[in-house]
């Protein structure tokens, strides 16, 4: 069972701005592009709680001990839960050579060697939840930061700011946080762990039950419960589900719990009830209630560890350790004469979350109405319990488990009290303005409502969802997709979904797109093409055709080379679609509606990839027959130059619907303007042409002037901020007299004397001053 936990998980490098992803191997984690010597390198491993970040860094440590990652002579691993106790202070030497490992001799010499050779040192901080907020860290003010006592935050601040051990490598693991971009300039590499794929889930379950008589039946049982199987994308949740499944099969039962709340209630029942006698029942209930209160008190402070002597009683400590709810650890000593101290930490984030929810229901001081304030879909300003992200779901689920005998024995509530709490939640959600919730809070509402499994609540929420649902940039895990699918299915409305940059997997995208009442959707191009290729391989041509008809692309903004590659893949997919449809319906021609209907395309790759990206884009522009707006103006300036202008001009005859062409700020000179002018008359629908802020001189203006009369559809020409003088301006003005169709010519530039421009405006009022 334990070996199964160390199974390989897919690692993904993630560009924070573009969300561009590529799979990498574990051996590539420390591969960073060359940079200044003796500069601290910062690597961040992101992943939701339970996806295997800790297992990954432990495996890195194990690999290093076996000879891999030989660039490091020292590797130090720290669990941030254990070192972040607020009252503790450390010197760097104590942190490395007391807390982590204490050499039998030569500590002073080893520490001096570390200080002199920082490039050979790797420091791993596992579970650094303060990463997103480190801009607010106290600056390291110690005069000798390597030797003075500091709080852990000051030490970390000094490490990140390169004041301490400059030149070392720092590896942090953290949960994904929206504010991470604030310190992205200090991060050299960001890696995201995405959890188990469906195939890896099956492999984990198979290994868990290896040698067990329930091996085949367990996998079948878990897969039949789609919601629990979706939660198995998280290795930690997969272990809990397997544990409960094993208990269910041993008791001869034929079905699993239907929600995550029931899974954890069953887990506690199996852990505690089956090992207790009547004498200890009351004592265990009291210890569990006390432990739940501790979980809540720590959780409110974003903590999961405490000094062991602060536990209220020996009984509670023994109870927590006996049932594996707490794990002990030793705290470092400042001197050998100091008494050894121990700490205790919750063994798992999910256990602490469940106990927090249990406390809120058991606490007598909390009235029914106050319970709803601990749910996460409150006002937009407050986000108090994000760290306890599972707690609101467990709280909602527990409110509707009044019939469960084990929960009743814990709560000592009568049915009347339980019903009152349910009515409070029902009333609260009925009054909730669901259409005003931001995507994160809407998703949290759906999660909580699903955990209740209350038909009225599920139907109520389903009927009040807005027809246009956007989850743009919101991570949708497999359980999220299952919940969303389940609730959408209940509604009679038709929905349009925006799933771009949601990290949705192919199975989830397929499930949502296949719903009849999902009439249109947007998703990342790479995800969509991957889905279509999957449907093509399985020969599910009916769903393939239906999903292409629902897909929306317009408007599309290309920001990376990958976007251009994905767009090329989409065009290539259309060719394959033609073959598929011919096989099934005998049609001789089929266009993907998203390609046929694309009207606006923005190109913003910047100077590094601008020309390269354009040269690739022009090869497929003809595939978009309805393209009306092509915008190559970007804040970072694409800089396609004369070569790009020439390449683009060659495909003008195919862009018959183009009405707006924006080539502003692209370093186009007279040569490029000449090439453009030759082909511009072939743009039969062009109404607006912008060449603002390029390098066009009088020769380029002369070439443009020659073709203006032939551009009969043109209404606006903008050549501001070029290098045109009064000569070129006069040529454009002379041509304008032959162009009654043009409504506005904008050509102000410092190289045209103001008096000249004023005179030209008097000759023709269509010239803007």
Image: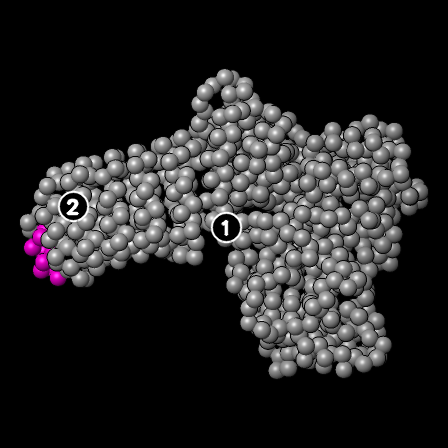
Q: In which quarter of the image is residue 430?
A: top right
Nearer-the-camera pick, 464 or 743: 743
Q: Residue 18 carries which label?
A: 1
Nearer-the-camera pick, 276 or 185: 185
Q: Where is residue 469 in the image (x, y as percent from the top left)?
A: 50, 35
- Asked whether, in this view, residue 37 is left or right of residue 206, the answer is left
Q: Where is residue 536 in the image (x, y as percent from the top left)?
A: 58, 29
Q: What element carries label 1?
A: loop
- Asked whether, in this view, residue 360 is left or right of residue 278, the answer is left
Q: Residue 531 carries which label?
A: none
Residue shown at the point (89%, 38%) measured from the top left:
211
| Extent of the magenta region | 753-761
Q: Quadrant of residue 491?
A: top right
Residue where numbered disc 2 is placed: 706
Residue 20 colored in magenta in the image: no
Spatial CA span between label 2 and label 1: 42 Å
Instruction: Please name which of the two marks, 2 or 1, marks the residue nearer to the observer.
Output: 2
Question: Could you classify mark 2 by the number of other residues whose Cα lies within 10 Å: few (under 14), some (14-19), or many (20 or more)?
Answer: some
Nearer-the-camera pick, 107 or 376: 107
Indicate the quadrant containing the C terminus: top left, top right, bottom left or bottom right: bottom left
Q: Position of residue 81 (x, y in %)?
A: 72, 60
Does residue 226 appear in this view?
yes
What secondary structure predominates along the stretch shown in magenta?
helix
Q: Position of residue 45 (x, y in %)?
A: 64, 56
Residue shown at the point (62%, 54%) measured from the top left:
191
Does residue 427 appear in this view?
no
Pointer 2 or 1: first along the chain:
1
Residue shown at the point (18%, 43%) measured from the top left:
707
């Amino acid at each position: 069972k334990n070996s199964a936990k160390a199974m390989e998980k897919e690692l993904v490098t993630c560009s924070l701005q573009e969300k561009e992803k590529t799979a990498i191997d574990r051996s590539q984690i420390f591969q960073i592009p060359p940079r200044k010597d003796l500069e601290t390198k910062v690597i961040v491993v992101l992943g939701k709680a339970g996806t295997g970040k800790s297992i990954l860094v432990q495996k890195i440590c194990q690999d290093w001990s076996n000879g891999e990652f030989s660039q490091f002579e020292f590797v130090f691993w720290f669990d941030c839960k254990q070192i972040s106790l607020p009252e503790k202070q450390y010197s760097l030497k104590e942190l490395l050579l007391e807390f982590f490992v204490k050499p039998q001799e030569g500590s002073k010499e080893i520490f001096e060697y570390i200080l002199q050779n920082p490039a050979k040192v790797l420091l791993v901080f596992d579970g650094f939840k303060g990463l997103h907020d480190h801009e607010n860290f106290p600056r390291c003010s110690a005069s000798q930061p390597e030797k003075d006592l500091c709080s852990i935050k000051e030490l970390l601040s000094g490490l990140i700011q390169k004041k301490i051990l400059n030149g070392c490598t720092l590896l942090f693991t953290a949960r994904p946080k929206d504010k991470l971009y604030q310190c992205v300039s200090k991060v050299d590499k960001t890696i995201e762990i995405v959890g188990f794929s469906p195939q890896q889930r099956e492999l984990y379950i198979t290994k868990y039950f290896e040698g067990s008589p329930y091996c085949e039946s367990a996998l079948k049982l878990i897969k039949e419960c789609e919601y629990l199987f979706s939660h198995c994308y998280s290795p930690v949740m997969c272990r809990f589900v397997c544990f409960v499944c094993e208990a269910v099969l041993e008791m001869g039962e034929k079905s699993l719990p239907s929600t995550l709340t029931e899974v954890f209630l069953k887990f506690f029942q199996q852990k505690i009830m089956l090992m207790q006698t009547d004498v200890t029942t009351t004592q265990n209930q009291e210890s569990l209630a006390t432990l739940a209160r501790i979980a809540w008190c720590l959780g409110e402070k974003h903590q999961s560890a405490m000094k062991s002597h602060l536990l209220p009683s020996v009984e509670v400590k023994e109870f927590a350790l006996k049932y594996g709810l707490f794990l002990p650890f030793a705290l470092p000593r400042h001197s050998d004469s100091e008494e050894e101290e121990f700490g205790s930490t919750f063994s798992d984030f999910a256990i602490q979350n469940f106990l927090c929810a249990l406390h809120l229901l058991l606490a007598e001081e909390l009235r029914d109405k106050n319970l709803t304030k601990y749910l996460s879909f409150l006002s937009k300003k407050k986000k108090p319990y994000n760290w306890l992200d599972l707690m609101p779901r467990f709280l909602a689920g527990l409110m509707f488990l009044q019939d469960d005998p084990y929960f009743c024995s814990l709560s000592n509530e009568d049915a009347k009290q339980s019903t009152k709490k349910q009515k409070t939640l029902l009333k609260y959600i009925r009054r909730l303005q669901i259409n005003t919730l931001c995507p994160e809070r809407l998703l949290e509402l759906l999660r909580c409502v699903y955990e209740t499994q209350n038909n009225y609540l599920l139907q109520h929420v389903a009927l009040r969802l807005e027809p246009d649902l956007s989850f743009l940039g919101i991570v949708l895990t497999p359980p999220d997709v299952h919940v969303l699918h389940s609730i959408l299915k209940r509604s009679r409305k038709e929905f349009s979904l925006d799933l771009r940059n949601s990290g949705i997997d192919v199975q989830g995208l397929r499930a949502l797109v296949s719903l009849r009442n999902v009439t249109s959707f947007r998703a990342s191009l790479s995800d969509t093409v991957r889905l279509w290729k999957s449907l093509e391989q399985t020969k599910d041509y009916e769903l393939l055709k239906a999903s292409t008809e629902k897909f929306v692309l317009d408007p599309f903004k290309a920001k990376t080379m990958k976007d251009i590659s994905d767009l090329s893949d989409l065009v290539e997919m259309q060719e394959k679609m033609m073959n598929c449809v011919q096989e099934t319906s005998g049609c001789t021609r089929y266009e993907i509606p998203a390609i046929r209907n694309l009207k606006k395309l923005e190109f913003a790759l910047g100077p590094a990839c601008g020309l390269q990206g354009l040269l690739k884009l022009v090869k497929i522009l003809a595939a978009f027959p309805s393209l009306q707006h092509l915008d190559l103006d970007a804040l970072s300036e694409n800089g396609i130059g004369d070569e790009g202008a020439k390449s683009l001009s060659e495909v003008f005859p195919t862009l018959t619907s183009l009405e707006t062409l924006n080539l502003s700020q692209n370093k186009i000179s007279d040569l490029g303007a000449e090439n453009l002018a030759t082909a511009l008359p072939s743009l039969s629908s062009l109404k607006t042409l912008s060449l603002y802020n390029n390098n066009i001189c009088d020769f380029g203006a002369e070439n443009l002037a020659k073709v203006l009369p032939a551009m009969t559809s043109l209404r606006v020409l903008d050549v501001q901020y070029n290098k045109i003088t009064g000569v070129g301006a006069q040529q454009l003005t002379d041509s304008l007299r032959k162009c009654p169709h043009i409504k506005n010519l904008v050509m102000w530039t410092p190289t045209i004397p103001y008096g000249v421009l004023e005179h030209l405006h008097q000759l023709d009022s269509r010239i803007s001053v």
